[in-house]
Image (spheres, helix red, strand yellow):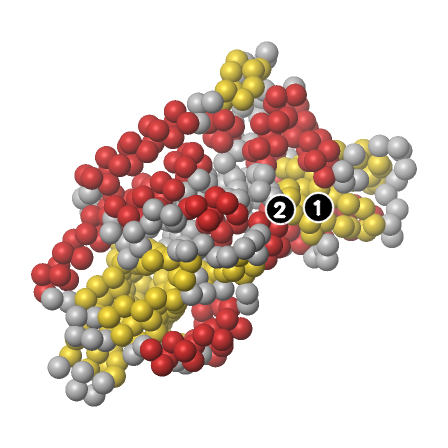
Amino acid sequence: MEEQIYFYYTNDLHSNFDNWSQVSYFLKQAKHRCQAAGDSCWTVDIGDHMDRVHPIAEAFKGKANVALLNEAGYDIATIGNNEGITISHDELVALYEEARFTIVCANLHSKEGEAPDWLQSYTLVTSEHGVKIAVVGLTAPFNAYYELLGWYASPPYEQLEKILGTIKRQADVIILLSHLGYSEDCEIARRFPGIDVIIGGHTHHLLRNGELVNHTLLSAAGKHCHYIGEVILTWDHNQGRLKQKQAYATNITHLPKDLDTDNLLTAYQERAERILAKPVAQLSSPLEVNWRKVTPILQALTDALKRQTNADCAMLNAGVLLESLPEGTVTYGDIHRICPHPINTCVVELTGSELLEAIRSSLTEEFIEFELKGFGFRGKMIGRMAFSGLTLQMEELKDRALFVKQAFQNDGIPLQPDRIYTLATADTFTFGRLIPEIARSEVKNYYLPEFLRDILAQTLQSM
């Protein structure tokens, strides 16, 4: 006898709810179809369902996301970095208190007392005809953030080595929910051949028909739930083995909306607007935002980063502010709208020559106009850089481009090439190759849990 077993999944929604009603419709229909046919099926989420860029996620600190997963009938989920490092320790402990699904994350550990009751390394589920399936979760070990919030994310390979032996003795099939990214998934498939399926996320890759790496099936469904993933396992009961495994990603944007889900989203949106309507500041005149200029509000926010950290200097890009603010009452909803990014302050150490090069590269037209995606940035383009604690000496070149000849501290002393300076900036620039000098810094001190918008609120209150 052969038995087909189904897993349906989502990954990296990032609180982009435009397609969520269609997701719910698809999943409810799929479960109904499987139940009617007598087939086993489970629905799982691979993390980053929450992203505080959306007012609903911001107002409810992710609890509305959990309610939406409950309503759609999810069975299992793992944790992404947006669940793990964008809310406080206590908020994460409370996040899944009302979850009607199982949360698996084998490499997340609390440093503040016992782990929450909902946190499990893995779970075992059994098909209609007795096939035992272990579902394990892993999340990206961003410990520079996690440890400041009272958590520790152990290295994924090390954690798998610890638990896989026990799991293999309990399960016929092993499925990994991986919020680690495509390259890490490939490496796990090479190192741990006992894992049958890896359902991935984090790097927003789309594998329309799955991919085999060392006999492990990899699957992923992009981002924002334009696609829903499906894994189909065929178990041969006569031979007692997994005969076939398939993976697909299906575009669901054309499907009808689930009305119950749509009504729930509408209700949460209305409640979120009321919660975020709390007044924060009163402006006696409008505050302009211009991505190509250092406006007073951008300068004030950059100065606030320097004060927050007591760094030697600070730099911040205009693109983090999305809209101007009119005269009158400013609410927290206004602040969230114009600064929606999950960005924290970071202080790095640079030599004077490295700092000067970082300043120069940040003022090029190519850098200012760069349309950045990811790294916590939720805007359109990087924009003009503002500085605090520094005065720049500019020189006009033959092509009329401006060149930073030298930079001075506020005491008039030029940057010394070999001296170490502390620079406060957005943590965006500590990742990737946007400003290599900052990304390469061996000292990076992050300031959590406050986001840039929390500092913006304080700045507006003092203006």
Q: Residue at x 36, y 81 (%)?
A: 169
Can residue 151 be seen from the camera position used here? Answer: no
| Of the pair 358 and 108, the residue shown nearer to us | 108
For this rendering, which residue is in front, 15 or 411?
A: 15
Quadrant (top left, top right, bottom left, bottom right) of the N terminus: bottom left
The spot of residue 260 in percent (x, y) is 20, 39
Image x and y of residue 174, in percent: 34, 74
Q: Which residue is mark 1?
A: 347
Using the image as rendered, state which of residue 56 and residue 254 is in the foreground.
56
**Residue located beneath label 2 in the image:** 427
Q: Residue at x 41, y 27 (%)?
A: 275
In the displayed structure, would residue 328 be above or below residue 44?
above
Q: Quadrant location of the C terminus?
A: top right
Amino acid found under the numbered disc labelled 1:
Val
| Label 1 secondary element | strand
- The answer for how far apart the CA atoms under marks 1 and 2 are is 8 Å
